[in-house]
Amino acid sequence: MIVLGIDPGTATTGFAILKRGEKNQKPEVIDFGCIITEPSKTAGERLLIIHNEVDNLIKKHKPHLVSVESLFFFKNLKTALPVSQAKGVVLLAAAKKNVPIIEFTPLQVKMTVVGYGRAEKKQVQEMIKQLTNLDDFDLKENNRKKDDATDALGIALCAIIKGFN
């Protein structure tokens, strides 16, 4: 099973492609990184870029499932609306290709990956390294070192651990 994990955002959308390994094997990280949009673009242009890039990822990797971070709560309405818009174009791209979608809150991801819902980002990142072949990747690459990319890894890994098909 191949899972596309998405951490939606208007400025930066994290993505990760994971493949469930054979029994007793670690899930394999196929690719991960960020879709970055320029602040000088209009909201519509930024959403179009995100949609097109997610569409390209779906075409290239043919995931069986798209796992997306769900906005469970928000502190700032100004942030929540653009994130919801970015999530909407991700859901549209998956729906157009008939790829099933599952959503996880940050708490669910932390609980599944680390076993503790209030885990710090560093703890989640360390568990992702232990549970996958992430060490095979060059983490110095610009689009790989962003938190959004590792958040997307956690979101994809959550779907694999929970065994969704």
Image (cartoon, grey):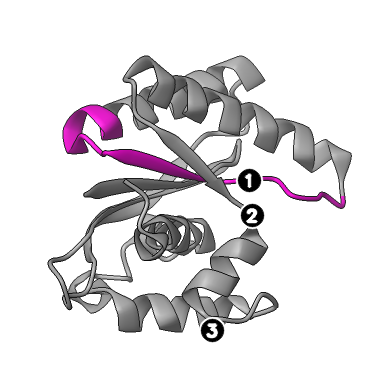
Left or right of 70: which side holds 75? right
Q: Is there CB contact under 8 Å for labels 2 and 1?
A: yes
Seen at 58% across and 75% down, the residue is: 121
Left or right of 76: which side holds 40? left
Seen at 49% across and 42% down, the residue is: 102
- Residue located farthest toward the left when viewing the structure as drawn: 22
For this rendering, which residue is in front, 141 or 89? 89
Q: Residue beneath label 3, please?
A: 123
Task: For mark 1, give the secondary structure.
Answer: loop
Task: For mark 2, give the secondary structure.
Answer: loop
Q: Position of residue 88 (x, y in %)?
A: 58, 26
Dot label at residue 151: none
Q: Residue beneath label 1, please?
A: 70
123, above or below 90, in the image = below
Query: Disc 3 residue type?
Result: Gln
Dot label at residue 105: 2
52, above or below 11, in the image = above
Magenta region: which residues?
A: 57-75
Nearest to N terminus: mark 3 or mark 1: 1
Q: Position of residue 58 (x, y in %)?
A: 28, 31
Nearest to N terminus: mark 2 or mark 1: 1
**Is 63 part of what is drawn in magenta?**
yes
Seen at 44% across and 61% down, the residue is: 158
Q: Position of residue 161 (x, y in %)?
A: 38, 65
Query: Disc 1 residue type?
Result: Ser
Q: Position of residue 142 (x, y in %)?
A: 37, 59
